[in-house]
Amino acid sequence: MTPETAKNILLARRDELLGNLDRIGDELDEPVPKDWEDAASERQGDEVLSALGHSDQTELRRIDAALARVEAGEYGHCVTCGQEIADKRLELLPDTPFCGNCAR
């Protein structure tokens, strides 16, 4: 995978994640229902949304790091051993910083 192709894929996923985080933030900011049962149900939903938000933020950090490697001309090389990362691995995990051997 070329760095330019990777950059386009990473930027598209980054935009998607930012949209998800905005929606999650909006939903978490909604007022709590006055009914106790509804409030309890709402709290469970908020916990799920919060967990999704944390997962999206983690992926966003990995994408930002991969984009920094693209800009530095280091994309596609393992940050641990310096070997090239297999194209199939990059196609599956475009934000991965590790080759298959170092990821194990």
Image (spheres, rainbow, N blue to C red):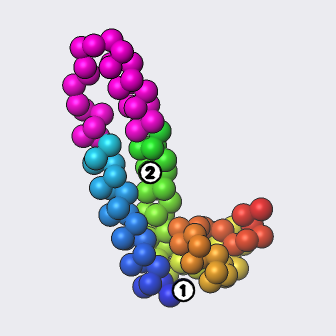
Q: How many marks?
A: 2
Residue at 27% in and 13% down: 35
Tell me if I can see residue 71 in this picture: no
Up/down of 99 relative to 24, above or below: below
- Looking at the rendered image, the quarter that the C terminus falls into is bottom right
Badge 1 is on which residue? 1
Badge 2 is on which residue? 56
**Which secondary structure is most common in the magenta stretch?**
helix
Q: Amino acid at mark 1?
A: Met
Magenta residues span: 25-50
Residue at 49% in and 47% down: 55
Q: Are marks 2 and 1 in contact (CB under 8 Å)?
A: no
Of residues 29 and 4, the one nearer the viewer is 29
Of residues 70 and 44, the one nearer the viewer is 44
Residue at 54% in and 86% down: 1
Is residue 6 found left or right of 28 in the rendered image?
Answer: right
Of residues 98 and 87, the one nearer the viewer is 87
Question: What's the distance in space between the residues labelled 2 and 1, CA to CA?
Answer: 24 Å
Up/down of 94 relative to 30, above or below: below
Is residue 50 found left or right of 62 in the rendered image?
Answer: left
Check if residue 18 falls in the magenta segment.
no
**Residue 47 figure quarter:** top left
Q: Amino acid at mark 2?
A: Asp
